[in-house]
Image: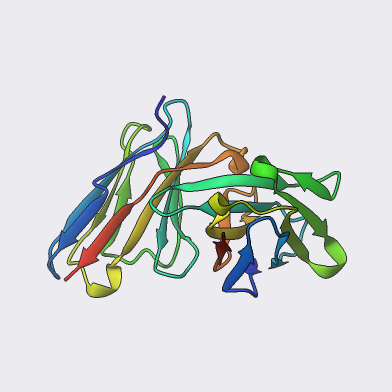
Amino acid sequence: AQSVTQPDIHITVSEGASLELRCNYSYGATPYLFWYVQSPGQGLQLLLKYFSGDTLVQGIKGFEAEFKRSQSSFNLRKPSVHWSDAAEYFCAVGAGASYDKVIFGPGTSLSVIP
Amino acid sequence: DTGVSQNPRHKITKRGQNVTFRCDPISEHNRLYWYRQTLGQGPEFLTYFQNEAQLEKSRLLSDRFSAERPKGSFSTLEIQRTEQGDSAMYLCASSFAETLAEAFFGQGTRLTVV
């Protein structure tokens, strides 16, 4: 069965520091991978996605993620964090015969110190 | 278009009562999803529709839960005989079929069962 793990429940970084959020997935076929962000009181917003092609994917808000098949990982990175990046981040994998639903990881909560 | 709209935003109900939530998707989207999210967890897939057809239901969706999308537009999620364990955020998302990555989420309905 498809699953997603996010090893870090909570991460705190200083504003301006770099960020890496870890994600590992379990999926038999070619995965369809996503990162979503959820700010307090807001809906889930798609940051970026990967299906095929270049394994380094650029997203919105200056985020990028790298797909590593050998490690079953899809880690999210940002070179310089802003205070407004404080939120909950979810890694997810497309599932089903036609990728018709998304399986989410448990999330990583990001705090940013001014 | 104002995106995916969910009503109500908050619902407090007594155990044993029935509740109904509504989701209005982005108008041209033919797929509609329901997810449930409990505190500190990622969203869990409940069910989805393509037009008016309910194509998949998670085993999380017990017999007390029913979802409809009668005209392929808005959808309702009803919970009968609510239990305290039903307390959660109920999220709705919509997309075009086969472009799952472009699913747009509403802000959710937070249900509290007392």
The front one of A89 and A98 is A89
Q: The N terminus of chain B is located in which quarter? A: top left
B99 vs B66: above or below: above
> Which residue appears at 64% of the width and 71% of the height?
A5
The front one of A53 and A19 is A19
Q: Is residue B110 left or right of residue A8?
A: left
Q: Where is residue B60 in the image (x, y as percent from the top left)?
A: 41, 67
How is the structure coloured here? rainbow
Q: Is residue B42 left or right of residue A41?
A: right
Q: State whether residue A1 appears in this view.
A: no
> Which residue appears at 62% of the width and 74% of the height?
A8
> Which residue appears at 62% of the width and 38% of the height?
B98
Q: Where is residue A37 in the image (x, y as percent from the top left)?
A: 55, 52
Q: Where is residue B49 in the image (x, y as percent from the top left)?
A: 44, 43
Q: The C terminus of chain B is located in which quarter? A: bottom left
Say how many tags the image has. 0
The front one of A65 and A28 is A65
Q: State whether residue A29 appears in this view.
A: yes
Q: Quadrant of residue B61?
A: bottom left
Q: In this view, does B113 lie to the left or right of B56?
A: left
Q: Where is residue B62 in the image (x, y as percent from the top left)?
A: 33, 67
